[in-house]
């Protein structure tokens, strides 16, 4: 997103930086700002909170409250947090108007580009290769990808208003997409875009749908609010109900099945992630670090790791076998709506109601790309001021490493493996709340009104 800033309101400092078209550095761009706003209380003459920002070394040293800046992560840097706090009693500088957005943005850019001391300094952020290469064995297409064959007819509930498409998933190998509906699952052939069958889900509303990595199993999770919830595994070809996992007292809101089909993870309002064995249905682990509803779960492509997200924006990465915590990913400020792994396992994507779409390095949890306003909606004419919702509601990687997302701007957007925009299309009939990509290179979106949309994938 491009920002238009009045040149009349910008000091020469910003004009020179813009003209140079270089990454900002401490000596030329940041120290003049600190001298203007901070050094009276945090300089050579006075070091409140043990902070001295009059030198680059002093900024790097931090103070009694810890580090001031984290290379590459402005949103996690105390300096940015304290100058952007919404509470005037906390925000710095004290008893003064908030710093202009352009100056705050310059400090963010300095941190995100690697905390350079001078124009000749190197970035302090780690060089990362986020190019996409299919993992070994990722092309293991089955000889006969599973498609429904003579499914039994079921009685489909008649509804006045269709259920919003709360979940959908596409087979990794067959032209097949499964879509959540009222007490059942609708199955579409993505080549013909026609409905070819249904699977019963009398357990309640389906909140999660996943295909197994080989495409032979369909996992459906959901339930009835404040009553019951479970995960059900179906045979894709026959529609036979193979297993029921979990016995929750509320609907299951998040679930996934491991690549080897030996583990199922589920979560919901209980704030606990439960991992079950599919062999005997027994509980293997209870992961109890979340403080709010579990909203998304995803096993890594090889099945060794499990990532979980919740309603506060917290994301935790776990060892799937032991249940041990590996990483805490802190960037989202609101509900995590989606988690998905790129098929090479190198990157993890998260989407949130805070409007952020983030590509994480799965090795160390670093946010290599953060699209803070991935789906910014246009301001309605009857809402002249105040915040408007800009959440990202669903995100899924395709087999080529591209990411597909939808959000409150009523658009479906595609992103290249490096996070740069690839294309977008507006959903004509309503708010898109779930997306998937098919094996025959189509984007499928489901909206709040229960409609299903198909488009060819942007190349």
Image: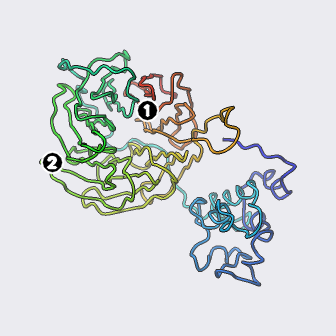
Q: Which mark is residue 252?
A: none
Mark 2 packing: few (<14 Cα in 10 Å), some, or many (20+)? some
Residue under the image location 57 percent in, 41 percent down: 390
Q: Are marks 1 and 2 in contact (CB under 8 Å)?
A: no
Q: Position of residue 176 (x, y in %)?
A: 32, 25
Mark 1 packing: few (<14 Cα in 10 Å), some, or many (20+)? many
Counting every numbered tag in the picture gives 2
Where 412 falls versus 248 (above or below)? Answer: above
Secondary element type, mark 2: loop
Q: Position of residue 29 (x, y in %)?
A: 77, 63
Secondary element type, mark 1: strand
Q: Position of residue 415 (x, y in %)?
A: 53, 37
Q: Which mark is residue 281?
A: 2
Q: Quadrant of residue 40?
A: bottom right
Q: Position of residue 442 (x, y in %)?
A: 43, 25
Q: How are the residues colored?
A: rainbow
Q: State the residue lying farthest toward the bottom.
A: 45
Nearer-N-terminus badge (1/2): 2
Q: Which residue is mark 1?
A: 435
Residue under the image location 40 percent in, 23 percent down: 161
Q: Would residue 381 be found to the left or right of residue 198 on screen?
A: right
Where 311 falls versus 228 (above or below)? Answer: below
């Amino acid at each position: 997103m491009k920002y238009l800033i009045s040149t009349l309101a910008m000091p020469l400092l910003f004009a020179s930086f813009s003209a140079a078209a270089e990454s900002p550095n401490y000596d030329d761009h940041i120290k003049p700002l600190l001298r203007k706003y901070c050094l009276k209380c945090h300089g050579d003459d006075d070091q409140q909170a043990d902070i001295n920002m009059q030198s680059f070394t002093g900024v790097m040293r931090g103070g009694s409250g810890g580090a001031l800046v984290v290379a590459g992560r402005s949103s996690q840097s105390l300096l940015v947090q304290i100058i952007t706090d919404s509470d005037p009693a906390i925000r710095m500088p004290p008893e003064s108007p908030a710093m202009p957005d352009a100056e705050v943005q310059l400090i963010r850019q300095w941190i995100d580009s690697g905390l350079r001391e001078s124009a000749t300094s190197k970035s302090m952020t780690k060089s990362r290769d986020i190019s996409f290469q299919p993992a070994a064995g990722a092309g293991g297409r089955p000889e006969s990808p599973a498609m429904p064959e003579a499914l039994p007819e079921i009685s489909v509930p008649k509804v006045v208003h269709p259920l919003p498409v709360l979940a959908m998933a596409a087979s990794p190998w067959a032209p097949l997409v499964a879509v959540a509906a009222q007490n059942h699952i609708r199955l579409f052939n993505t080549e013909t875009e026609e409905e070819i069958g249904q699977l019963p889900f009398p357990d309640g509303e389906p909140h999660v749908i996943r295909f197994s990595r080989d495409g032979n199993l369909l996992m459906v999770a959901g339930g009835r609010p404040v009553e019951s919830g479970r995960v059900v595994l179906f045979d894709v070809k026959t529609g036979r109900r193979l297993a029921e996992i979990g016995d929750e007292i509320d609907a299951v809101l998040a679930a996934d099945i491991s690549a080897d089909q030996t583990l199922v993870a589920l979560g919901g309002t209980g704030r606990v992630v439960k991992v079950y064995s599919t062999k005997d249905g027994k509980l293997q682990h209870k992961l109890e670090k979340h403080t709010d509803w579990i909203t998304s779960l995803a096993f890594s492509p090889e099945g060794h790791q499990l990532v979980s997200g919740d309603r506060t924006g917290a994301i935790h990465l776990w060892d799937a076998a032991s249940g041990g915590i590996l990483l805490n990913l802190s960037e989202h400020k609101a509900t995590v709506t989606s988690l998905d792994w790129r098929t090479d396992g190198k990157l993890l994507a998260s989407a949130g109601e805070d409007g952020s779409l983030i590509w994480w390095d799965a090795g160390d949890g670093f946010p290599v790309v953060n699209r803070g306003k991935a789906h910014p909606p246009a301001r309605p004419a009857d809402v002249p001021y105040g915040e408007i919702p800009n959440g990202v509601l669903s995100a899924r990687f395709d087999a080529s490493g591209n990411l597909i997302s939808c959000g409150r701007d009523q658009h479906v957007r595609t992103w290249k493996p490096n996070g740069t925009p690839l294309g977008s299309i507006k959903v004509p009939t309503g708010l898109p709340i779930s997306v998937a990509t098919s094996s025959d290179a189509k984007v499928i979106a489901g909206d709040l009104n229960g409609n299903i949309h198909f488009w060819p994938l942007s190349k």
